[in-house]
């Protein structure tokens, strides 16, 4: 592993978030096979119900099994009052005689890393940008405008400080790397693209799984299943999703599947758009069953608004839809993925969210599902293995 003796990972998302499995746990497992000394700092939730607590406890136990109990620390809060304590905890596990690689995911973790770097300059600080947080706060945080503006400005300060102190960077898309490189002077410092990777141990296609989960729904072999998997948050474009399903509900043979933890809200959307209940399934599936339901699907939806947040994004769901052999409907300008769909024969890239359902259905009829060769090429490029190889070269 070159001159690196210790890797310290500071995560961005809460341990209960949907992206945590692919962004943190899979990363820890893969790196543990390459590097013996890894310490992880993560964040919990201020409020949690029993379901969320169960998820957190399960993930925490898994991390401790992978890395060792003494190498996993869970912080409860983010913010100025907690930051000084967190910085000291991170510094305490760093031996200045060892070469330490500090991998920080996104803005708050990057700020902690920058503070550690100013006090321990021999640490190599790498910041991995998962999303453009200032604009996420401004456009999607759902609080009054003055608060959103304050959050935007704070995140821009974080961003500037990170680029002042970090030794290397990565972003989830080529568009994101280009966006940040145009704003800040990066110079000769390495700047990688580490896209959201498909966890091949959890997402794959099998004919047996497709038959089993179609029976569970239960939908017939001739039915075309249109699926959305995700939350009902504003940036997921729930209105556009259900409006499209409403249009398709008038077409023969179409059935709908919503995989979400927000079941009650999804049901309200279904009623608002008057989508027939007998043609719709709304399911909060355990993580290990999502793959089965995606195997049963035929068409998957990934719709986003055309703004900077989505323009630089790398939604994990894209790869999960693709490797489970679904046709994909994606809106234009979603990270690097919209261009992939434009050049493919297995999907449709929409120029607008004002969708003519019948026209889209005819266009999808002319498309085919992804081939094994296309899936293999995607997995080769957008894989955790490929991301790890890039990180290892820095180490």
Image: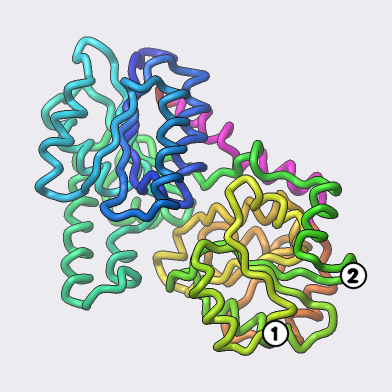
Disc 1 designates what residue?
276
What's the magenta bit mostly, secondary-structure-wise? helix
Q: Nearer the viewer, residue 273 or 355?
A: 273
Q: Is residue 335 left or right of residue 37?
A: right
What residue is at 23 percent from the left and 36 percent from the top?
113
In the image, residue 133 lies at what x, y percent?
A: 31, 58
SS assignment at label 2: loop
Q: Is residue 86 left or right of residue 28?
A: left
Q: Nearer the viewer, mark 1 or mark 2?
A: 1
What residue is at 46 percent from the left and 56 percent from the top?
175
What residue is at 21 percent from the left and 43 percent from the top?
111
Is residue 202 shown above or below 258?
A: above
Q: Residues within 10 Å of mark 2 (few under 14, many from 20)?
A: few
SS assignment at label 1: loop
Is residue 150 shown above or below 80?
A: below
Q: Nearer the viewer, residue 264 or 299?
A: 264
Q: Which residues are magenta?
A: 370-393
Q: Is residue 355 magenta?
A: no
Q: Nearer the viewer, residue 175 or 203?
A: 203
Q: Residue furthest right?
A: 222
In the image, residue 202 lies at what x, y percent?
A: 64, 41
* Residue 49 occupies quadrant: bottom left
In the image, residue 274 lies at what x, y percent?
A: 63, 89
In the image, residue 261 lies at what x, y percent?
A: 51, 62
Disc 2 designates what residue?
222
In the rendered image, which quarter contains the N terminus? Answer: top left
What residue is at 16 percent from the left and 75 percent from the top?
146
């Amino acid at each position: 592993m070159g001159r690196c003796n210790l890797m310290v990972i500071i995560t961005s998302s809460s341990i209960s978030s949907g992206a945590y499995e692919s962004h943190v746990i899979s990363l820890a497992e893969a790196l543990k096979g390459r590097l013996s000394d890894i310490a992880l700092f993560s964040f919990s939730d201020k409020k949690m119900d029993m379901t969320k607590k169960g998820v957190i406890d399960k993930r925490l136990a898994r991390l401790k099994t992978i890395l060792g109990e003494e190498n996993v620390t869970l912080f409860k809060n983010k913010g100025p009052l907690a930051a000084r304590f967190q910085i000291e905890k991170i510094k305490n596990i760093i031996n200045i005689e060892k070469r330490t690689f500090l991998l920080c995911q996104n803005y708050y973790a990057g700020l902690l890393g920058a503070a550690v770097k100013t006090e321990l300059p021999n640490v190599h600080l790498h910041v991995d940008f998962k999303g453009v947080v200032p604009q996420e706060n401004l456009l999607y945080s759902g609080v009054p405008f003055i608060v959103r503006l304050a959050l935007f400005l704070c995140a821009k300060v974080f961003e500037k400080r990170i680029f002042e102190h970090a030794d290397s960077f990565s972003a989830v898309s080529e568009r994101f790397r280009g966006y940040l490189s145009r704003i800040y002077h990066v110079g000769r410092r390495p700047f990688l693209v580490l896209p959201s990777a498909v966890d091949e141990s959890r997402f794959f296609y099998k004919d047996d799984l497709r038959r089993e989960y179609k029976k569970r729904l239960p939908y017939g072999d001739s039915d075309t299943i249109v699926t959305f998997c995700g939350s009902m948050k504003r940036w997921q474009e729930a209105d556009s999703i259900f409006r499209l399903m409403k249009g398709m509900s008038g077409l023969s043979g179409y059935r709908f599947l919503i995989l979400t933890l927000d079941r009650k809200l999804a049901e309200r959307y279904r009623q608002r758009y008057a989508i027939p209940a007998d043609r719709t399934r709304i399911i909060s599936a355990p993580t290990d069953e999502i793959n089965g339901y995606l195997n049963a699907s035929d068409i998957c939806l990934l719709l986003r608004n055309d703004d900077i947040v989505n323009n630089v994004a790398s939604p994990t769901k894209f790869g999960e839809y693709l490797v489970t052999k679904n046709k994909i409907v994606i809106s234009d300008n979603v990270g690097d993925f919209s261009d992939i769909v434009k050049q493919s024969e297995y999907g449709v890239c929409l120029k607008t969210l004002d969708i003519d359902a019948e026209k889209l259905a005819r266009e999808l009829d002319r498309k085919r599902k992804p081939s094994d060769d296309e899936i293999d090429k995607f997995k080769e490029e957008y894989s955790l293995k490929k991301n790890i190889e890039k990180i290892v070269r820095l180490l």
